[in-house]
Image (cartoon, rainbow, N blue to C red):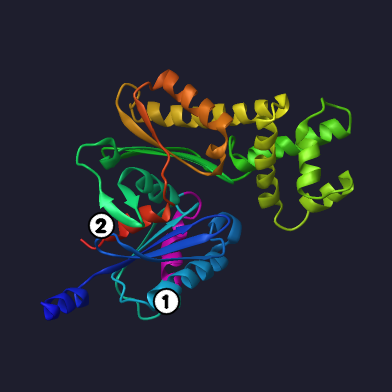
Amino acid sequence: MLKLKNMQKENQNYVIGVDGGGTKTEAALADSEGKILKMVKSGPSNLRNAGIDKAVLNICEAIKKLKQEKKIDSIFIGLAAIEEEYRPKKGKIKKEILKRLKNFNRKLEIVSDQSVAFRSGVDETLSHLHLRPAKRGSVTDEKNGIVLISGTGCVCHGWKKGKEAKTSGWGWLNDEGSGFWAGQKGFQAVFKELDERGPKTKITKLIFKEWKLKNKENLLRKIYSKDSILKISLISRIVDEASKMGDKIAISIMKEAGRELANSAKTVTKKLNFKKEVFPIVLIGGMFGSKVVLETVKKEIQKFAPKAKFIQPKVDPVIGAIKLAIENLD
């Protein structure tokens, strides 16, 4: 009996899932049954913000921390911007990753972070970091549906019977409803107050208190320095805090963010003809931590898609990458 167990262990397949984002890269090691054995983090790997070289370096750093533990049969990587402007360079990125990993000759796939995020929400539930299969035919077993992501940036992507549709995801200058967008609106509201061009807002007091600033010159230096995209995105949390205190300007910003996100989902819903059907919408990202944003998104989406089922995963998107890595074993 002991010998049989040892043989089963020797024949066990192991996989690595990677979720590469704008602030961090998260990687997980699991067996073929979906049991998570270890999770690690490294630096950012959003291709648009970090660039190819830095992204590849951080991805490989995370994988190497896990790869030395077991013999890996499948690696699945979800990357932001890979299916937008970096699609023609996917082959080069994959080649660079394999070059750094050395002697890895098993399966390695790179897909959009949107695919990974969607699968983290609809494919499996997680208990004590162990994946358990959902019931066949349930909404959580669906491979058709929509993912709406709003963190530093935002994007909406949907799948239905081999057809895909996508809106937003074009970078921080365009992503209406994202953390950067809300943070920028908050930053503008602060200086409208300071210039007496606009009404007073609690955002101003909160940002000076939170960041321990003495004057507007301190604020300007903090914003217009290194990592300005991240810092502006962080202001969205301060805007949300002000909205909880009843600040009208903050509430207005967060409601508008919700409407913009819902509009993206509406467009994808129409393109895939989900409007009258039961389908999952997976909501992922820090902006959905805002009650105002979440309630606005749900209310607006239900106006045109009343049968939509909202899912907010209790697990990180990297779990979706693990699921895809396991499927890739076949």
Residue 162 is at least partly visible in this image:
no
Left or right of 76 on screen, residue 100:
right
Within-10-Å neighbours for mark 1: few <14, some 14–19, many 20+: some
Residue 28 is at least partly visible in this image:
yes
Q: Quadrant of residue 248?
A: top right
Which amino acid is tagged 2?
Glu
Q: Secondary structure at mark 1?
A: helix
Placement of 303 over or under 268, stated as above or below: above
* Nearest to the observer: residue 284 or residue 102: 284
Q: Residue at x 51, y 61 (%)?
A: 25
Prevailing SS of the magenta stretch = helix
**Residue 92 magenta-highlighted:** yes
Q: Mark 1 highlights which residue? A: 101
Pair 2/1: label in front: 2
Q: Residue at x 14, y 79 (%)?
A: 2
* Nearest to the observer: residue 266 or residue 282: 282
Q: Which comes before the other along the chain, label 2 or label 1? A: 1
Q: Position of residue 305 (x, y in %)?
A: 38, 22
Which amino acid is tagged 1?
Leu
**In the orientation shown, which residue stands out farthest toward the top?**
303
Q: Residue at x 89, y 32 (%)?
A: 195
Q: Position of residue 194 (x, y in %)?
A: 87, 34
Q: Mark 2 highlights which residue? A: 327
Q: Residue at x 26, y 38 (%)?
A: 161
Q: Which residues are magenta?
A: 84-97
Q: Secondary structure at mark 2?
A: helix
**Residue 234 magenta-highlighted:** no
Within-10-Å neighbours for mark 2: few <14, some 14–19, many 20+: few
Placement of 85 over or under 162, stated as above or below: below
Q: Position of residue 178 (x, y in %)?
A: 59, 39
Quadrant (top left, top right, bottom left, bottom right) of the C terminus: bottom left
Placement of 187 over or under 57, stated as above or below: above
